[in-house]
């Protein structure tokens, strides 16, 4: 297949070709191996059965006058995470769990959210239809409260069922962009041809549905920031380095962007490089693509447990039993009175406007699905802290590390995978010693197009990655 435009002469890519040869040899050595504890794409019938089993366990608990609860692997602790050089961060086989109980004011809302989303997923799979996370939120915004609550519930369900999110028929709205030497067909038959022009293509919503991917690309470049991505397109970098592919997740990558990059690696096994700021948060983003994410937290005040939440529990179970699980005995159908018992909250307490807790809203890691998302073969192309010194970037363009930067840097240095990356560790220690960071835009002080015409081409030609 011919793609326009033409890039450098063939000899320019000698270092890249040697690198790809080593990657292909590594892939061949590992062929047929399945990562331990890997989740897999489950069939619709398997997911439906798993959901039915969970609901039946809840119903049986109620019949025995026991408190229903969801048991979910604890993804927010490093104790449950191990580093596998071939996969990245993944959960250990026998990890600790946490319970989301229905008898506590602190967890009853979470219980109701998971139950609600489970019922929606069940119907989506039954009807072989898909919905975005945003669609799910708007079905009952009063119950969910915010989009983050929906996102967290979906990740909990995926972990609880031990299936990737795409098996749940729930899609994410993509924010990433792709450009360069690639064409493919979407699930509905739409043919897409990415280009090297200033107008990039949005990352598809359904990565699993992408078919007939074709490329001649010599490499894939992941660009941390949208502004840098657009500047490279404006400078015709993609055309001059053709054939290549560029992707940006516009900062911290969404799930679809990570799935796309993983799909491109699995399909073509071309070298994958990252271009990030020489600061702790740019390095963190690179680590997410390469090894996976752990945890980020923020504090917020949770909303009160409302009567809407309490009644939703009973209504959801009643609907699930009557409509989704006709094989369940009629005596197990939940009454409206039982719905309050399920919540473990008295009616007076449930409508109290004073019921607020300061709690941690945790964005859980996706380490339980690491093998579907991570690419341990990714290499760091730039901006390296050593490049700042080597290129004599003016000191007045550097930025002092903040207290949060230093904490993030210390955290990264303590992670298990840094032991396997001595060159990365050396770069991080160099940043820590200098107490300075730099954005990619600092290269413009050397010349306005230094990044696209000098820095990146030389790195790619002479193997300047680690």
Image: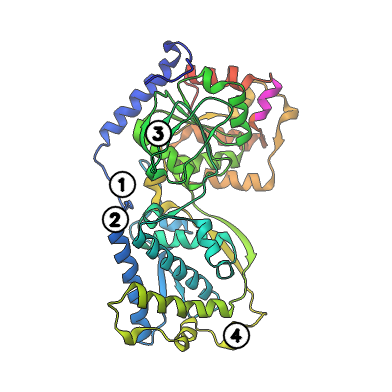
Give the number of the mark in front: 1 or 3. 3
Q: Nearer the viewer, residue 223 or 56?
A: 56
- Per the image, is 275 magenta? no
Q: Which mark is residue 349?
A: 4
Q: Which mark is residue 35?
A: 1
Of mark 2 and mark 4, the one earlier in the sequence is: 2
- Give the structural element (helix, strand or loop) at label 3: strand
Residue lying at 38% horizontally and 87% vertically, measured from the top left? 65
- Give the structural element (helix, strand or loop) at label 4: helix
Q: Nearer the viewer, residue 110 or 51?
A: 51
Determine whether, in the image, residue 430 is placed left or right of residue 85.
right
Determine whether, in the image, residue 220 is placed left or right of residue 430.
left
Work out which quarter of the rendered image holds the N terminus and state it: top left
Q: Circle 2 is placed at which residue position?
A: 43
Residue lying at 36% horizontally and 78% vertically, measured from the top left? 322
Q: Which mark is residue 184?
A: 3
Q: Residues within 10 Å of mark 4 (few under 14, many from 20)?
A: some
- Identify the image quadrant of residue 283: top right
The magenta segment = 441-446
- Give the structural element (helix, strand or loop) at label 2: loop
Of mark 3 and mark 2, the one earlier in the sequence is: 2
């Amino acid at each position: 297949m011919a793609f326009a435009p033409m890039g450098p002469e063939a000899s320019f890519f000698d270092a890249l070709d040697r690198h790809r040869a080593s990657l292909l040899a590594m892939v061949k050595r590992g062929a047929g191996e399945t990562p331990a504890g890997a989740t897999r794409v489950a069939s619709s019938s398997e997911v439906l059965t798993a959901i039915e089993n969970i609901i039946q366990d809840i119903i049986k608990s109620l019949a025995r006058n026991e408190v229903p609860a969801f048991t979910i692997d604890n993804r927010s602790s490093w104790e449950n995470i191990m580093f596998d050089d071939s996969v990245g961060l993944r959960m250990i086989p026998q990890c600790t769990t946490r319970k989301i109980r229905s008898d506590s004011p602190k967890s009853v809302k979470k219980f109701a959210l998971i139950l609600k989303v489970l019922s929606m997923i069940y119907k989506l799979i039954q009807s072989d239809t898909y919905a975005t996370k945003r669609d799910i939120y708007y079905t009952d915004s009063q119950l969910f409260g915010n989009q983050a609550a929906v996102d967290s519930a979906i990740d909990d369900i995926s972990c609880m069922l031990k299936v990737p999110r795409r098996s749940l028929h729930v899609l994410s709205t993509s924010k990433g962009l792709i450009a360069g030497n690639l064409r493919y067909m979407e699930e509905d038959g739409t043919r897409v041809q990415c280009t090297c022009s200033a107008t990039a293509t949005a990352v598809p919503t359904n990565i699993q549905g992408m078919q007939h991917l074709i490329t001649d690309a010599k490499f894939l470049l992941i660009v941390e920031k949208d502004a840098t991505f657009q500047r490279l397109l404006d400078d015709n970098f993609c055309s001059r380095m053709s054939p290549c592919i560029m992707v940006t997740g516009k900062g911290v990558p969404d799930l679809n962007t990570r799935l796309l990059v993983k799909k491109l690696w699995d399909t073509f096994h071309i070298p994958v490089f990252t271009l990030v700021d020489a600061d702790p948060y740019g390095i963190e983003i690179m680590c997410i693509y390469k090894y996976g994410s752990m945890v980020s937290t923020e504090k917020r005040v949770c909303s009160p447990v409302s009567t809407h939440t309490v009644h939703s529990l009973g209504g959801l179970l009643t609907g699930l039993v009557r409509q989704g699980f006709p094989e369940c005995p009629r005596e197990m159908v939940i009454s409206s009175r039982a719905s309050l018992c399920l919540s473990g909250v008295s009616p007076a307490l449930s409508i109290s406007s004073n019921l607020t807790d300061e709690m941690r809203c945790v964005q859980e890691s996706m380490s339980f699905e690491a093998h579907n998302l991570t690419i341990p073969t990714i290499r760091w192309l730039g901006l390296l802290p050593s490049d700042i010194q080597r290129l004599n970037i003016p000191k007045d363009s550097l930025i002092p590390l903040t207290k949060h930067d230093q904490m993030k840097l210390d955290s990264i240095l303590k992670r298990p995978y840094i032991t396997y990356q001595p060159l990365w560790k050396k770069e991080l220690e160099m940043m820590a010693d200098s107490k300075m960071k730099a954005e990619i835009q600092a290269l413009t002080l050397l010349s306005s197009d230094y990044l696209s015409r000098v820095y990146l081409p030389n790195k790619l030609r002479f193997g300047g990655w680690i």
